[in-house]
Amino acid sequence: MAEKFQETGAILKNERIADGMFWLQVKAPEIARHARPGQFVHVRVTGPSVQFLRMPFAVYDVTGEAGVVDICYQVLGEGTRQLSGLSCGDELDLIGPIGNGWSVPSGAKHALMIAGGVGAPALNLLGRQMAADGIVVDAVMGALNEERLCCVDHIEQATKASGGTLHITTDDGSVGTKGFVTAVSDGLIASGAYDYVAICGPLPMERNAARPALENGVPCQVSMEKLMACGVGACLSCVVDTVAGRKRCCVDGPVFDAAEVIW
Ligand SMILES: Cc1cc2nc3c(=O)[nH]c(=O)nc-3n(C[C@H](O)[C@H](O)[C@H](O)COP(=O)(O)OP(=O)(O)OC[C@H]3O[C@@H](n4cnc5c(N)ncnc54)[C@H](O)[C@@H]3O)c2cc1C
Ligand code: FES
């Protein structure tokens, strides 16, 4: 198993970037140096009267030289509410990098990334890495509405740098194509252009977005954001049913081959 680190570092930025969405930067040099695309950090707000359980967040970005880890999060419950109230200089406790990360098939030339809502942060580093490796990267990013879209600028940098195209969908049509991501991604996959598809978002979206890739035999991976407690494989709160039996999202994932998952 790859090395994990526990680091307590100062917050450098905690900025609202969209409706209920924040971009946070924290000093965590070892995690920044070792994180790979698709891995996550397990975060705990320190201090009295804060919640006990850690929260998993995808590594959105890293700056290895500066020792900085970025996450992008949506305020959902008590933990993320507390996180959103923190200021620069406050400290956070992180364990990471955790998980297997994406594995792009060797020889891939044209990839499609599909992001639903707050699934986008898990795809940012992957897009950048694939662009650097000479793979053309297209992306479909979907959200409830324009205000809920996050990480668009970063993902667009990767698609542009690779010579690929970014497509936007919103459920209410406030920007991009009206409808779910599948309104665009189904047709793109059916065109036969792709030799790798990477998906991150809510479970029903992942299941539907992966279907045409599975039907057409296109290698497809999904990052599954299951509810987690321990984050170290001990509590079994994060199990995923697969053709090879029950797997733990925290230590066996969070990235799984879509063909392996029993949807
Ligand atoms: C590997 C992984 C990567 C993640 N990456 C990100 C990320 O980059 N950005 C981000 O905003 N969130 C991400 N999440 C989800 C994030 O961990 C939760 O939203 C957060 O822990 C909620 O904490 P809370 O205390 O605010 O809410 P809680 O009080 O714990 O939950 C509030 C409500 O949200 C539901 N909920 C909590 N976690 C999840 C989940 N994983 N899936 C579906 N429903 C959930 C709960 O059932 C409850 O109804 C990720 C989850 C995993 C497992
Ligand atoms: S969170 Fe405990 S086993 Fe995965």
Image: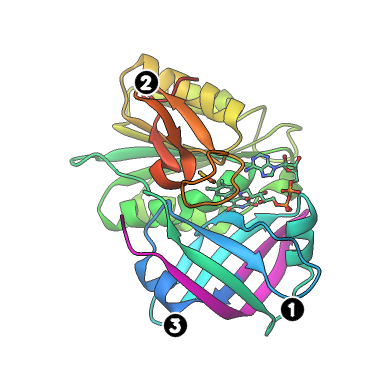
The local crowd at label 1, few if under 14, some if 14 to 19, many if 20 or more residues have their Cα within 10 Å, is some
Asked if marks 2 and 1 touch (Cβ < 8 Å), the reply is: no
What label sits on residue 263 in the rendered view? Answer: none
Q: Position of residue 48 (x, y in %)?
A: 78, 74
Q: Circle 2 is placed at which residue position?
A: 243
For disc 3, the marked residue is 66
User: What's the residue at 51%, 75% (across, down)?
Assistant: 7
Q: Indicate whether residue 20 is drawn in magenta.
A: yes
Estimate how packed mark 2 is, as few (under 14), some (14 to 19) or many (20 or more) residues with alpha carbons within 10 Å.
few
Residue type at numbered disc 2 = Val
Q: What residue is rendered at 50% in x and 65% in y?
A: 95
Left or right, residue 195 beside residue 156: left
Q: Quadrant of residue 17?
A: bottom right
Mark 3 or mark 1: name the one nearer the start of the chain. Answer: 3
The residue at the far front in this view is 234
**Residue range of the region highlighted in magenta in the rendering:** 1-24
User: Would residue 51 be visible to someone looking at this image?
Assistant: yes
Residue found 37% across the figure and 23% down from its top: 259
